[in-house]
Amino acid sequence: MKKFLTLVVFLFSSSVIAEVFYCVEDDAIGWQRTNNLSFSKFETTKFIVNIDFNLRTIESDHLDLDKLLPHHCYENRGALNCIDEYGMVFIFNKNRKDFVTLRAYLKDGIKTDDIFMTKGQCESFN
């Protein structure tokens, strides 16, 4: 019973540290593969991201950085920098609550994905 209570307290305390953010891109630029890698503006979007600063993990359907794809996050000078093995990058500044994303798939066999960068602001749900 004591082990069970310890586990429940641990799980509850780690979920309190995680924060949910509503993020809005205000600019999106890049290169379209379908148009011979011509420079282009992309449509901006809104998304939700769950960030656990203690565990240095993020989850978001929009970012493709979640539990299914291996990714690593590092904290440096107030910013959480996350990258996966395919070239998706998400950088979030904890103090200003702004972000930058980069999607740069340059792996062999992947010739249909666009290369682009976005920037924007987030608000905390917590």
Image (cartoon, helix red, strand yellow):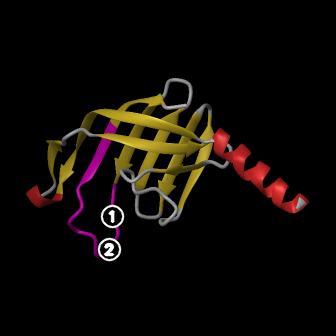
Residue at left offset 19%, top offset 41%: 43
Instruction: State the CA–CA distance, disc 1 to disc 2.
Output: 7 Å
Q: Residue furthest front?
A: 1
Tell me which segment is drawn in magenta: 104-118
**Amino acid marked by disc 1:** Leu
The image quadrant that residue 122 belongs to is: top left
* Disc 1: CA contacts within 10 A as few (<14), some (14-19) or many (>=20): few
In percent of width and height, residue 124 lies at 50, 30
- Chief SS of the magenta region: loop
123 lies above or below 40: above
Q: Is residue 61 magenta?
A: no
Describe residue 61's horizontal placement relative to residue 32 as left or right: right
Q: Which residue is mark 2?
A: 108
Residue type at mark 2 is Asp
Q: Regarding mark 2 in the picture, which secondary structure is present there?
A: loop
44 or 4: nearer the eye? 4
Q: Residues within 10 Å of mark 2 (few under 14, many from 20)?
A: few
Residue beneath disc 1: 106
Query: Is 9 positioned to the left or the right of 60 in the image?
Result: right
Which residue is depicted at the point 38% across and 43% down? Answer: 101
